[in-house]
Image: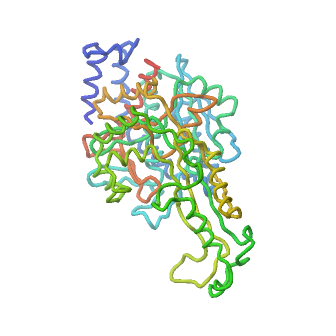
Amino acid sequence: MDWQSFMTSRRALLQGTVAGAATLIPGTASAARSSDMAAIRRAVDAGLPASVARIQNWIREPTIAAERHRINEGVAHMSKLARDAGFGKVRAVPTGGVPAVFATLDVGAPKWMGIYFMYDVKQFDPAEWSVPPLEARIVDRPGVGKVIMGRGAVNQKGPEGAFLAALHAFRAAGRKLPVNIALIAEGEEEIASPNFLNAIRDPEVLATMKRCVGVIIPSAGQAPNGNATITLGAKGAVEMEIVSSSQSWGRGPAKDIHSSNFARVDSPAWRLVQALGTLMAPDGHTPAVDGFFEHVRPLTARQKAIIAEGARKASEADAKKALGVQRWIKDETWAQSLERLASQPTINIQGLVGGYTGPGGKTILPHRAVAKVEMRLVPDMTKDDSVAKLKAHLAKRGFADVEVNVTGGYGPTQTPEDSALIRAQQAVLTRAGVSHSVNVRSAGSWPGVVFTGEPLRLPAGQFGIGTGGGAHAPDEYFVIESSNPKVAGLAQQTMAYADLLYEIAARA
């Protein structure tokens, strides 16, 4: 992306020389807004080293909800980030689990914009990384550019840092924000948000969020060809452990015993395998839980057209390379794979744990075995209904003793294509000359349903340019200086957030 071209086209637009300017920016003082954006860009450039350092320092403060690791430190650091960015009121919100952080930046503007952050990260094994995962080292990545490498770099501290950089730039440039901002930051996103709805139910949070015109989670999803994605929704997610144990079953050993006894003693590990086998059709990917597809809403003709257009703009080869795969299920076409990705609910085994898993062998018969399982849900499925069906399915087949322990989850989220929030995102990317397509639904999940569902019913989605990779994996990274002219670096990402706030003020 050539940001100078962006500024040139923006000035032309704001001065009325581009057709449709009144439609894109209704009721805006054009010359003043153009001057503001130029001043903000100068502040972004001047503050870039501080913006990079802010992201690095955040990566060095990991909060891991799954391990209850550095919870208090995470709350304190997130609170400080908000105060430093100009939020006047910041407080921790009890949830029954890891606290959320709620902050408001009220500049007296007519409109409020909601921002969702997550401040927790996934676990990591330093032995799998090429650099220490909490060092936040700046690395030259061939074909990509300068990146910050570390756990949480792209998911989501880098994009969130870019948004914070925009707020710092407004203040440094002496420019007033065009909207008020309500920020809600969660500390349990990586364990499927088991308590986040409790934060929204806080009276002050609920009253403020109800005033917002919409909610975004900052993201960085540009493809190598420069195409950005505007996502209308996301699948829901349910995290659980499915456990087979001698204690619950009443059969098998009370503790691990010598494996020779398998000739006469039942195996909880094999029972778990047999129970899991009933959940999936013989094809290995279609859920076989009774009634699982009962409430699945089929894709509309418009949604299928959106997916087809997205397939034309995206690279199948790049996607396969990034995933390390050679074929899609059933050797389907690129477009078919994208339809499946958006429309199909799933039941996935994340991991199997039982008995001995170290080097070599150990001749034991385990007394307990656990499967880490997730479900991904599509409209109109719900968490509670899907879990109930899975439990009933197992009980019907004689596995009532197999425990299903849900650790977190929420339903799918969806925002209308014609909402003001989505139209504002499209306007920003169009003016920036960024090719973009609409994604019906992300196969990944975030708790957007907390905003789009009751009681708020707000439009909500991801927004951001730039790129990164390795989320939940070793060598996670976030691009701060792109060597690809089609992909934004940190400064350009920051400017896109600034522009979005103006656009929201103008049209929402």
Is residue 182 positioned above or below 52 on the image? above
Furthest residue toward bottom: 260
Q: Nearer the viewer, residue 57 or 491?
A: 491
Is residue 482 positioned above or below 351 on the image? above
Q: Residue at x 37, y 31 (%)?
A: 495
Side of 20 where 136 appears, left or right: right
Q: Residue at x 35, y 37 (%)?
A: 491
Colour convention of the picture:
rainbow
Q: How many callouts does the rendering have?
A: 0
Side of 1 where 356 appears, left or right: right
Q: Quadrant of residue 206?
A: top right
Q: Quadrant of residue 254?
A: bottom right
Q: Nearer the viewer, residue 314 or 397?
A: 397
Is residue 266 positioned above or below 459 on the image? below
**Residue 256 % position (x, y):** 67, 79
Q: Residue at x 28, y 46 (%)?
A: 315
**Residue 86 % position (x, y):** 53, 30
**Residue 475 % position (x, y):** 41, 58
Q: Nearer the viewer, residue 18 or 8?
A: 18
**Residue 358 % position (x, y):** 54, 77
Q: Residue at x 61, y 39 (%)?
A: 101
Q: Nearer the viewer, residue 256 or 165?
A: 256
Is residue 168 positioned above or below 324 on the image? above
Which quadrant is home to the N terminus?
Answer: top left
